[in-house]
Each structure stands twice: as structure tokens, then as C-alpha cells.
Amino acid sequence: MGSPNTYFDLPSFVNRYMVEGIEKYKFLQGKGYGDVLNLSNSHCIIELQNFGEGVGFAFAAISDPETKFSLGEYLNAFVEGGRQKYWPKPPQGMDFQQKFINDLLAFNLVLTSETLAAPLAGDFSWVPKLAAFNEEFSRLSKELTRLEIVDEHPESDAIWNKKSDGDLTWMDDVRRILAEQESKS
């Protein structure tokens, strides 16, 4: 077991656990700095960051490296089942090194699937759809808070649990409740 600040040699772990995805998209490893490692090809940059309890994954167009997108948000917006499909929460009791490896294996699975094919090939035409999804996510999160606090809705705890587990069906639950409330008024 490691502490939350456990240091892992990110480049060597990435080379070991993400090799297929790196080769498929011809990624080159940039210089790592601290707990961050960049991978890039002619279209896309991936930034991996060791948070101690896991690894963050953001990506950007090579032409606009400052505008980064979260892998988790991308998966939630465009993949049935969201980020949970490829990158589920690790089981309780998993040590930091195993969580770290688990994240890298999930990222490799995402890279070897066709899930990120568009951005990895330089197609960022999906950005407006991601923005719309994020707006809807935020709006429904606020509505869920209102349902819990103002309406004391009996389903709010169960819906919050779904949301915290990464189960995106919570959004449908909130929409259904709002529609039911609208039809009663």
C-alpha cells in the first residue's frame, strides 16, 4: 500500500500498460514534468496526471493545446453508460499502485477502442455537443439539489447515489420527475 502521495514512474507505467493504444495512434512521449506526462501525435495531445489516488486524462487538439477536454466528461457525453463503461470506480480496498495501473489499463482500452477516434484523428467538431451535454448536466444537477432541499422528493437520495456512482441514468430520473411535476401544474 502506498500513501496518497505515492510516486510512480509515470513514463515507465504508461509504456507498460498503455502500449497498444500508444502504438495504434502513433503517440510520442513528451517530457514528463512532476506528475504529468504528455503523449502526442500529429493531431492530438494527451495529458496524463498522477493524482496519487488515480490518474487524470485530458486531451487537446494539437492546434489548440490550451483547450483541454476531460476524458471522463467526453465519455459521459458520447458513450452509452458513460465513463463507467471503460473507467469504473475502483473497488474498495484497492491499493494506490493497483488503482494507478487500473486507470492506465482503462485508458488503453479507450485508446484501442474507437471511442476517441475522432479527436485522436484531429476531428473536434463534437465540441458544441459536449458543451450542450455539460450545460444539461449542470442544469439537472441544480434541479436535483432543488428536488432534495425544496421538495424533499422521496427519490432524491437514490438519485444522488446513482450520480455519485457515475450512473448517468440519474439524469433521466430528474427529467422524469420534472415532467411529472410539470404535468401536475
Image (cartoon, grey):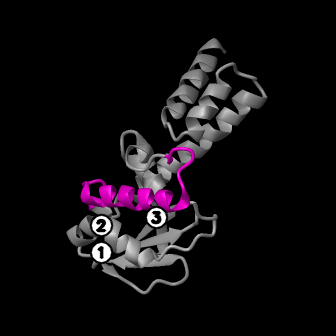
- Determine the secondary structure under disc 3: strand
**Which residue occupies the extreme left position in the image?**
24
**Whether residue 101 is situated above or below residue 162 in the rendered picture:** below
Residue at point 49% right, 57% down? 99
Residue position for label 1: 43
Q: CA distance from mark 2 to mark 1?
A: 6 Å
* Magenta: main secondary structure: helix
- Determine the secondary structure under disc 1: loop
Residue position for label 3: 57
The C terminus lies in quadrant: top right
Label 1: how many residues lie within 10 Å, few (<14), some (14-19) or many (20+)?
some
Q: Is residue 167 magenta?
A: no
Between residues 155 and 5, which one lies in front from this camera angle? 5
The N terminus lies in quadrant: bottom right
Give the magenta part as a residue range.
Answer: 89-117
Name the spot of residue 18 as percent of width and height, x first: 32, 66
Name the spot of residue 124 as percent of width and height, x first: 35, 64
